Image (cartoon, rainbow, N blue to C red):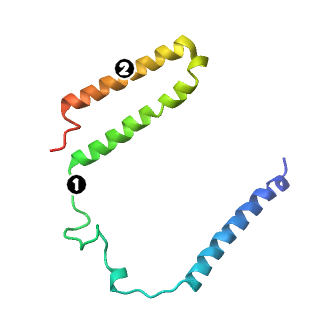
Amino acid sequence: MNLESYFPVLLFILVGGGVGLAAITLGSIIAPNRPDTEKLSPYECGFEAFEDARMKFDVRYYLVAILFILFDLETAFFFPWAVSLRDLGLNGYITMVVFVIELLVGFWYLWQKGALDWE
């Protein structure tokens, strides 16, 4: 394989970069630049910030967020399994039942430990 076959890829990258750079340059030249105190002020939910932006959050916030992502990703396995259930047969069904049981046991454990309580 020679390097000439990669020329369309190089051309695509160059044209894409050129279009992106042209859009940014044109936007900075044409766009109005009239900053005022309202535009330059820090924004936090519509009112002035009342604490330091680097304040510490409670660990439970991160725990709930991580658990949400974990269970969300695990439930994402249900759709491909349901679509291909006929092709998987009994072995695929049993494997998914074991997965669901594992998911429910993990959820029950977290519930019992109070990881989902927000007080």
> 10 left or right of 107?
right
Percent position of residue 49, x then y: 23, 71
* Vertical comparison of 115 with 18: above or below: above
| Neighbour tally class for label 2: few under 14, some 14-19, many 20 plus, Cα within 10 Å | few
Q: Nearer the viewer, residue 61 or 9?
A: 61
Which mark's residue is nearer the viewer, 2 or 1? 2
For residue 57, the mark is 1
Q: Nearer the viewer, residue 83 or 63?
A: 83
| Neighbour tally class for label 1: few under 14, some 14-19, many 20 plus, Cα within 10 Å | few
Quadrant housing the C terminus = top left
* Vertical comparison of 58 with 74: above or below: below
Q: Residue furthest left?
A: 119
For residue 71, the mark is none
Label 1 sits on a secondary structure element that is loop
Residue, disc 2: 101
| Residue 38 position by quadrant | bottom left
Query: Mark 1 is on which residue type?
Result: Phe
| Residue 69 position by quadrant | top left
Spatial CA span between label 2 and label 1: 33 Å
